[in-house]
Amino acid sequence: MDSSQFANLSPENLSKIQKVLKIIIDLLELKGVNRLKSLKIPLDTLAQQGMNYEEGIAVVDKINSMIDAFDVLGEEFKQKLQFSWSTETELERVRDEMKLFRVSEEDLNNYLILRVKTLDAKDKLEKILTLIRSYASQPVVFPAGETILYQNHVLFFKLGDGTFDSIDFNSAPILRKVFECFWELRKRSTKISFVPTEVINIHEELFKGKIERHYLAIQVSNLKRTKLKSKPHLKERFQIGFDRNSKTWIFILQ
């Protein structure tokens, strides 16, 4: 295992993985590793870290892709209960299995429930956490003289105090494609305004598909609402919109 597998993960997702790893490691320190017991992560704990149940499952799946350490026991029990309704005997069999792992039906609604598959899970998780922390601590390196950097679908802005801020497009593939159209046009010229056909043509070139003018306008509006509204300090540095007078798209990064 090496840090190269983190290259396609955004800073936001790396942060989520670190948080879940720390939660699981802390639970294993307190409870120990027992393959016949469940490991329960409170949904309130995930919420405090900015994640819902589905995001927690996605993070566990990502961790599992690295070391295959867990079964998502809660999901297994939910499915068994859902599809074992035909006879009371089948339901009782599932409930008995849940009792073996000390899981109640109420727990299924309040916890992300795992079963540890390997006795060395804690050691493996700690190694992953160390690798991610080392990888994440590497500085963002801007090209000489540049204050803007786009890599791994994340747009970085160098700030006046030497730190940086970022806009992450990893979780928004449609908005990412729209942004990358304007980014590519910016790379190819010194212009800040583009006629609609330029944007439509570059979208077809980059992504092998057409984008309608009205759909482009909707997605630019979504980009401004979801990615820029929460970062007013970047308002002057990232501008995108349609100028009705010149009938051109304006795209400014500085």
Image (tube, rainbow, N blue to C red):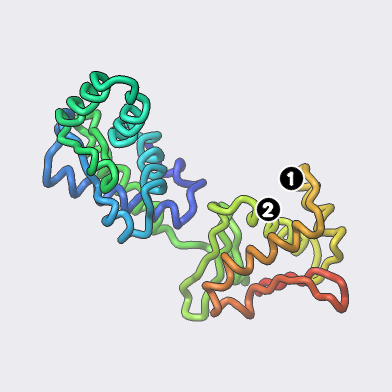
User: Which residue is at the front of the view, 149 or 67?
Assistant: 67
Above/below status of 197 relative to 25: below
Q: Residue at x 22, y 21 (%)?
A: 93
**70 lies left or right of 220:** left
Q: Which residue is mark 1?
A: 207
- In percent of width and height, residue 130 lies at 30, 49
189 and 13: which one is in front?
13
Residue 142 vertical placement versus 87 (above, below)? below
Task: Name the element at disc 1.
Answer: helix
Q: Quadrant of residue 85?
A: top left
Is 173 on the left or on the right of 217, as rendered? Answer: left
Q: Is residue 144 visible?
A: no
Q: Position of residue 212 (x, y in %)?
A: 81, 54
Q: Tell me which label, 1 or 2, sits earlier in the chain.
A: 2
Query: Element under label 2?
Result: helix
User: Disc 2 marks which residue?
Assistant: 177
Q: Amino acid at mark 2?
A: Lys
Residue plotted at (20% across, 26% down): 97
The residue that appears at 25% across and 47% down in the rendered structure is 41
Relative to the observer, which residue lies in front, 131 or 195?
Answer: 195
**Mark 2 neighbour density, 10 Å: few (under 14) some (14–19) many (20 or more):** some
Q: Is residue 243 above or below residue 48?
A: below
Q: Which mark is residue 224?
A: none
Report the number of discs. 2
- Which quadrant is home to the C terminus? bottom right
User: In the visual, does 123 lie left or right of 236?
Assistant: left
Q: Position of residue 235 (x, y in %)?
A: 61, 78
Q: Amino acid at mark 1?
A: Phe
- Residue 125 is at least partly visible in this image: yes
Assess disc 1: are there few (<14), some (14-19) or many (≥20) residues with their C-alpha within 10 Å of its C-alpha.
few
